[in-house]
Amino acid sequence: MKLHPMIAALRKHKAGVVLIALQIALTLAIVCNAIFIIGQRVERVGRPTGLDEGNLFVVSQQWVGAPSADTPDGVAKLDAMLKEDLATLRSLPGVASAAPINSLSLLNSTWAGALSTKPGTNFTDRGSNVRTAYYFTDEQVLPTLGLRLVAGRNFNAADVQNHGFREQFTYPVVIVTQALADKLYPKGDAVGKTIYVDGSSSPSTIVGVVARMQTPAVGWGDNFAWHATLVPVRLDANFTRVAVRAKPGQLEAAMKATAPALYQVNRLRVLDDDSVRPFTDIRAKAYRADVGMAVLMGVICLILIGVTAAGIVGLTSFWVGQRHRQIGVRRALGARRIDILHYFQMENLLIAGAGAVIGIVMAVGLNMWLMSRYEMDRLPVFYALIGVVAVLALGQCAVFVPARRASNVPPVVATRAA
């Protein structure tokens, strides 16, 4: 099939050709970036936290008329109250273990800092420091959270200290994630090595390494997402948070028993409907925005694809109506139905191809703009190529019905008066 007559015919419909080509280009540019965003959000939602999320729930509560955490006597009273709560929760029939914790993966409440292998390092010196999120807890944290120890040991009761929430204190021993250990000691020998916390000159010893634990901040980059540090310290304040591991199949029962048991110990506390939450709810809330963005991008893609397909169908149907007699002449001269069908498909392929070339340029430009304004990665070539194939396939599908109708024009049409 010769292209010259086809191009000559398209020149007579420049406005329609330009509009459809630009519509295809715009659709390609937006859909490529939208699908890339959807892919990133889906990957983020699906990434594992490192926790055994089943049968895990969190208890958050506020003391009423609590002692001040700014005095040694107040800290001692707050710690006694916290330990009483821990003993109560651990004694519940449906509870396997419980551990105090200042935050948890996906809670978006982060105590962040930096670790270094050198003492007295400037906290802001990114070249010498590795950012991390701290989890303050006790010796029951690994079985409670279901963390997998890959090297070293867990904390023991002798390691655990208690401090007021705003106190300055040292970290004699810590457990770090594998990603953080590899960053600090790339040779893989982190256990037993010393690190320095937040520019301190006091050394901390790495006693254990866990496979993975996600930081509380959902929106932070992947380089920071797995840099978690466990510290054996009970933080004493007028607010407490405890992670609880229920026995298999007893999650609901353990959660229902929690508030009555704690009120029986001390009624001067606030426990509302959100105070006792399963980790599944925490995960759902943390990724609600990502799921919403993915759905929104998906709807936008479907609308753009639908509008573009409708435009191709409408314009091709209009051209078929205008060329009715010409099609009849071609049929009278021996053109087969398949030839007419292929003609309109090839014509659409030329327009869609031109639109795809423009669309790739627009897609790259849009991606660069998003990178400059938002935390977005560079659009992989793979997405652009898939987008080109998709818009070409969309064009062929959209043009098929009007092209098939054109192929059914009988040769007798050529003998009718214009």
Image: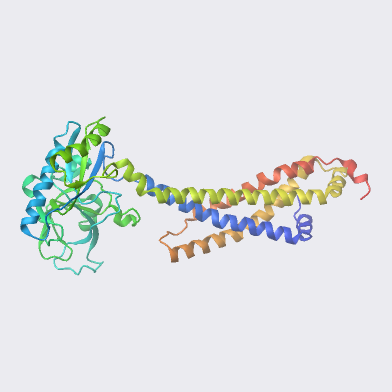
Which of the two residues, 410 or 202, is positioned nearer the viewer here?
A: 202
Location of residue 196 by image quarter: bottom left
Q: x and y percent of residue 414 in the render?
A: 90, 46
Colouring used for the render = rainbow
**Most foreground residue, 353 or 293:** 293
**Number of numbered tags placed on the structure image:** 0
Q: Residue at x 10, y 53 (%)?
A: 162
* Up-down relation of residue 102 to residue 276 (above or below): below
Across and down, in percent, residue 213 comes to 25, 48
Residue 148, can we see it? no
Residue 392, compared with residue 169, is above or below; it is above
Which of the 4 image quarters holds residue 280? top left
Judge left or right: residue 385 versus residue 216. right
- Name the residue rendered at 22%, 61% in the picture: 113
Identify the residue shown where x is 74% and y is 61%.
Answer: 14
Residue 15 occupies which quadrant of the picture?
A: bottom right
Could you say which is closer to the camera, residue 340 or residue 228?
228
Q: Position of residue 329 (x, y in %)?
A: 87, 47
- Give x and y (percent) for residue 119: 13, 66
Decide if residue 361 is on the left or right side of residue 66. right
Decide if residue 227 is in sight here. yes
Q: Is residue 280 left or right of residue 210?
A: right
